[in-house]
Image (tube, rainbow, N blue to C red):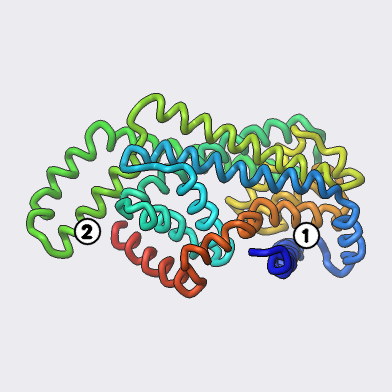
């Protein structure tokens, strides 16, 4: 995609993100007193070098995710990093284009383009989500500690603390339950399931096909075979979230005023509330990572609403929409149009529902 054709894409992405941020936070912002000119001034005065650094860092994050996926995938088939990286970018671009409906596209692309079993690949996807949940739980806990160290009072401070505690507790419980289930499957469950489904598989027909899919899915979520695999995957996860925190710092630091004074530790607190916002509804604001970042900027650090919206908007563009600059051309190159992606997502949803 050449430079002239990228400019309209950038404008469209910017308009979508601005509309999304304003829509999700309209009740909190009181839009009747919101100044569009102040918003534009905040964006115009930002330092582009920090923003470019943040965008490059996001592509490094996708690379780290690809390395982690490679650790999982090499236990079910060939795992070439560059193939995984390109398909990861394309898959996340599909999520940006389709929303939640695009979630199944990435594991499906990774399976079909590498001749891997679809069910096994979706098992890896579930395992990846488990590592992500664990990372979010740790960051939410760290954010709660950092928030407790700062002076805060009033009803909003109490609600924010409660939201962070709720998120951390739910994620911790979910990760613990999933870990227990994986350990059980590792020690007993898979062999038992294979024995019970053996007769069904021999019988043929749709029941045999479904049994093979279920076994493949179970094999996929157990692709961590050694302690080295676990250490590598955990290390990649930690580095991934560290780079994400740096992205939040560089984006915040690129603006003038109060935003420019936000340091790396403060940026980690913004990241924590952004993740909390993407997990549950924040009080008086709503859901979404943009809402979480916005409420952190305004309530915790006292940033004016226009610069806060500008920073939340840029964060969303870089972390959520940034993959589209490379991902959309990759999707087009692979021959996947929007209609085809929707069809794939719908079909895969039905297959996943059948497994469950």
Q: Which mark is residue 303?
A: none
Q: Is residue 23 visible?
A: no
Residue 113 % position (x, y): 39, 56
Residue 209 % position (x, y): 19, 59
Q: Which residue is mark 2?
A: 210
How packed mark 1 is, by other alpha carbons closer than 10 Å (few <14, some 14-19, many 20 or more), is: some
Which one is closest to the eye, mark 1 or mark 2?
2
Horizontally, residue 77 falls left or right of residue 171, namely left
Residue located 74% across and 39% down the image = 267
Horizontally, residue 34 falls left or right of residue 266, namely right
Residue located 32% across and 43% down the image = 77
State which quadrant residue 218 falls in.
top left
Horizontally, residue 266 falls left or right of residue 186, namely right
Q: Nearer the viewer, residue 328 or 153?
A: 328
Residue lying farthest front? Answer: 2
State which quadrant residue 326 falls in.
bottom right
Residue lying farthest top? Answer: 227
Residue located 58% across and 34% down the image = 138
Q: Secondary structure at mark 1?
A: helix
Disc 1/disc 2 C-alpha distance (Å): 48 Å
Q: Nearer the viewer, residue 199 or 282?
A: 199
Image quarter where the N terminus lies is: bottom right
Pointer 1 or 2: first along the chain: 1
Residue located 53% across and 33% down the image = 236
Q: Which residue is mark 1?
A: 28
How packed mark 2 is, by other alpha carbons closer than 10 Å (few <14, some 14-19, many 20 or more), is: some
């Amino acid at each position: 995609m050449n430079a002239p054709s990228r400019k309209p894409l950038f404008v469209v992405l910017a308009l979508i993100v601005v509309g999304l941020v304003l829509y999700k936070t309209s009740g909190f912002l009181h839009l009747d007193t919101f100044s569009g000119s102040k918003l534009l001034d905040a964006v115009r005065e930002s330092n582009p070098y920090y923003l470019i650094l943040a965008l490059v860092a996001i592509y490094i994050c996708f690379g780290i995710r690809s390395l982690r996926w490679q650790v999982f995938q090499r236990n079910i088939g060939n795992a070439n990093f560059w193939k995984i990286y390109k398909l990861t970018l394309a898959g996340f671009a599909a999520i940006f284009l389709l929303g939640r409906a695009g979630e199944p596209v990435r594991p499906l692309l990774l399976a079909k383009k590498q001749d891997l079993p679809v069910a096994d690949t979706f098992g890896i996807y579930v395992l990846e989500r488990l590592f992500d949940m664990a990372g979010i739980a740790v960051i939410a806990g760290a954010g709660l500690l950092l928030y407790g160290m700062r002076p805060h009072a009033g009803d909003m401070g109490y609600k924010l603390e409660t939201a962070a505690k709720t998120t951390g507790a739910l994620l911790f419980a979910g990760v613990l339950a999933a870990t227990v289930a994986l350990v059980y499957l590792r020690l007993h469950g898979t062999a038992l399931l294979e024995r019970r489904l053996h007769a069904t598989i021999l019988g043929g027909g749709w029941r045999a096909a479904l049994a093979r899919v279920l076994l493949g899915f179970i094999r996929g979520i157990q692709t961590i075979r050694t302690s080295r695999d676990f250490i590598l995957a955990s290390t990649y996860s930690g580095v991934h979230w560290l780079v994400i925190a740096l992205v939040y710092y560089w984006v915040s630091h690129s603006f003038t005023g109060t935003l420019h004074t936000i340091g790396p530790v403060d940026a980690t607190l913004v990241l924590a509330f952004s993740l909390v916002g993407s997990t549950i509804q924040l009080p008086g604001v709503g859901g979404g990572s943009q809402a979480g970042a916005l409420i952190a900027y305004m309530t915790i650090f006292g940033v004016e609403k226009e610069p806060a919206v500008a920073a939340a908007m840029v964060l969303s563009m870089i972390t959520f929409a940034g993959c589209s600059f490379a991902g959309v051309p990759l999707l087009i190159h692979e021959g996947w149009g929007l209609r085809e992606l929707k069809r794939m997502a719908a079909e895969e949803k039905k297959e996943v529902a059948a497994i469950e």
